[in-house]
Each structure stands twice: as C-alpha cells, then as structure tokens.
Amino acid sequence: MYIMSYIYDESFAIKDIKARMVLDSRGNPTIQVKTVTEGLGLGIANAPSGASTGAHEAVEIRDGGKEFKGKGVSRAVENVNKVIAPALIGLDSRRQQLIDRKMIEIDGTPNKSRLGGNAIVATSLSVAKAAASTMGLPFYAYLGGYVADTLPVPMLNIINGGVHAGNKLDFQEFMIVPAGFSSFKEAIKAAVEVYADLKKILKEKYGPQAINVGDEGGYAPPIEKVRDALDILIQAIKAAGYDPWNQVVIALDAASTQFYREDKGVYVLEGTEYTREQLIDFYEKLVSEYPIVSIEDPLQEEDFEGFAEITRRLGSKVLIVGDDLFTTNPARLKKGIDLKAGNAILVKVNQVGTLSETLEVLKMAFTNGYRAVISHRSGETEDTSIADISVGVGAGLIKTGAPARGERTAKYNRLLEIEEELDNPRYPGFSALLRKP
Ligand SMILES: O=C(O)[C@@H](CO)OP(=O)(O)O
Ligand SMILES: [Mg+2]
C-alpha cells in the first residue's frame, strides 16, 4: 500500500463502491454512487444532468433503446460496479487526485465517453465525501479546513425561459441576487419574499397559469420579452420591500447558444436577428437601465472573441460568466484567460467530470482574477455536494435555482445548516458590483 504524504491509516482505504439508479428532478434516471471506507466512512453522491449542455462537456452514458425512453443508466451503473470499483477498492480515499486520474486513465477518452461522465462524477464526489466522513468532518471542512467560513451569495433563478420552460422567453434564466445582506439566512429570507411577491404579481397580471414553474423552480409565465421579465422582477423586489440596486439585484443566463443560428451566424432574439455587435449593444443598454450584476453566456459557446469584446465593454460593471463557453474545462478556461474572454466562470463538477479537475479549474480562475459561480444543473437530485463545495472553496457565489422544488431547496437548506454550524460564518455579499441607478 501507498502511504506518501498521508499518515498511513487503514480506515481511509476504500472498502466498497456501489452504483445504482435513482431518478432526477425531470423524472429521468441518473446514477448514485456510495463509497464506504474501512473505517466505515460513507459518501453518497448523485450525478446531475443538464438540458442546455455545452458541446465540450463530459459525456453522459445513457442506454438508449426503449426502456426509460432511452435514458436508462444501467451501462453507467455497470461501469462503476464492474470497472471503476475494482480499480479503486483498497486505495486511500483521501488521494483524490490519484483516484480521479485513475478513472480518467481507464476511460481513455478526452470527454469521458467510455466510462461515462455521469459514472465518473458520482464516483469522484462519493469518494471525497467518504474520506470526509471517515475523518469525521463535514464535506466543506474536508475541502477547505477552518478557512472555509464563507457562505456564497446565491443567484436564484425565479423566472425560467429557454429550454427550461414552455414559454417564449429566449433568455434561459432571470435570477435575483440577494447581495446586500449580512448573513445567508437574511439573504434567503429576502429571496423567498421576492419569490412570493413575484407569484402574486404574475397571477394578477397574466392569470393563474403564469405561476406554473420551469425545471429550476422559477415561474414560467407567458412573457416573451426580456425587458418585460426584468420589469416584473424589479416590481417584485420593490413589492417585497427591498432596494433593487443595493439589496436584491439581478443576474441573467442568456444561454445564447440556444438562440444562435449557426448557419446564418446570427442570434434570433424575440423574433429579430442580431449580429454579435448588435447583441452586445442590447446587453449594454440593459446593464445601463437595470441593476444587472452578472450575465452568463451572453454569446454562443465558441465565440471567445465576442466574449473578449463584451468583457472589454461591460466587464468593469458586471460579471461576464462563461458556462457553455468554458464547460469547467481547464484548457478552455486557459484560452479564455489568454484572450481576456469573460471575467467569471460557471463551475459544474459534472461538466468536467471529476472533483480534482474542478478544483484545478477553480484554482486557475482565482489566480487569474476570475470569479467563480458554483452551479447546479437543470436536472438535479437531493444531493447537496455543491453547497459544501461552494463553502469549501470559498467561491463566494452559487447558482442553484428558485427557493422552491426540493432538489433546489436541498442546497439552500444545506447552506442554512452550514451557516449555523460555523463558529464565525461570513457573508461578504457582493458590494463590488452594486451600482447606483
Ligand atoms: O445553463 C445553465 O447554467 C444550467 C443550469 O442552470 O442549465 P443546464 O443544466 O440545463 O445546462
Ligand atoms: Mg448556463
């Protein structure tokens, strides 16, 4: 057995790894992995699943065929139980880099398509959580030690559009950001109150059908125009008694790859064609009129140059967040840094596929002055790993949906729990990006 820099302790050795199928929030099968150590530490993790996936993400393995409408995960489950588990059993669960590298090697593809990104991510996280459990530490403290004392500012997606909803909004996410508060609990309280007032306003204005929700728990009203959604958000923030420029501000995920027409090289927004330059002008106007602090994927996923241009123009005022652009991939982030494309990265563990690669991306982001938003997927489960990761790495920002639907509230509830658990919890908010009207 290896010992290396760790004090040898048999109790950290991986005793067993088992995968099984569970269901996600869209009713699709996904994979759950349980890791047990010799010291009876237990780590459980579920793979989430995206709908607006980036072209450069780690690939999920699905069975195809008739069962579960092709979405079954029995092949991915088998890959964990028959290929990954035998290779990892006996290894020290604390050696995350070695364990992740082993899986990457066995997989042997650049996008994890042989073993499956879903199989690998659930295993990677479950091993880390098993090591934490063996140590008797909460996962965030295992990752960050006692330095991990900072709760993230949440970005709560309360109006859903794009491929996450059955309405005609082209932008995918309209988020509220309770930035101007002194604790996470107060921030969540404000978000919940705005969410409740939004419901009332939408119902009055558009009728009861307007309060049906999308994949991430935000309302999916029959609104078609970006400005109408923004106006109603401002109305709800004010109705709840908060200042939309200083307390509860706004973030967007345009997810623009979804309304980009590659054949013509234009964006089709609200029925009108926009060139890249025209779309940047549109964002610039929005930023000058509304308390927007962050825009994710304003341009399509291959447009590093466009990202550099919009960052040059708006980056001193707002976060320009690369999600589909970077896909939590170190090589793509490096390219972004070199070109000054974006000033923030959306971080989804399952986009790259392992915890250690995720930590590598985060380190690269922070050392190069990029902000990082730890993020859920539109298809989620009750797994709360990302809440712990956001605190563990001190990310300062998390995006995990509306304050409704169990798979979203699980993360917020975990953060509330962490805030109570910490001796000296901090909630620095987001003052750097608050502006005057
Ligand atoms: O685009 C996004 O940021 C995510 C999460 O909100 O959506 P999906 O998981 O569908 O990629
Ligand atoms: Mg996105």
Image (cartoon, rainbow, N blue to C red):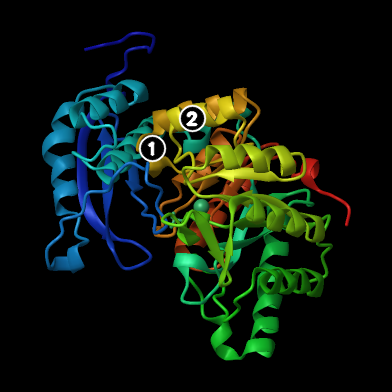
Is 55 on the left or on the right of 341, as rendered? left
Q: Quadrant of the C terminus?
A: bottom right
How far is disc 2 from disc 1 in space, using C-alphas? Answer: 9 Å
Q: Label for residue 352?
A: 1
Q: Is mark 1 within 8 Å of ligand 1?
A: no
Rendering coords of residue 277 (x, y %): 64, 50
Q: Label for residue 396?
A: none
Q: Is mark 2 within 8 Å of ligand 1?
A: no
For the residues labelled 2 and 1, say whether their Cβ atoms are less than 8 Å apart. Answer: yes
For the residue pair 356 and 321, the one nearer the viewer reads as 321
Rendering coords of residue 149 (x, y %): 64, 35
Q: Amino acid at mark 2?
A: Val
Q: Residue at x 51, y 48 (%)?
A: 375
Is 234 on the left or on the right of 157, as rendered? right
Rendering coords of residue 231 (x, y %): 74, 72
Q: Amino acid at mark 1?
A: Val
Picture quadrant of residue 218: bottom right
Name the residue carrying label 2: 361
Q: Residue at x 31, y 68 (%)?
A: 27
For the residue pair 371 and 186, the one nearer the viewer reads as 371
Residue 172 in view here: no
Labels 2 and 1: the sequence-earlier one? 1
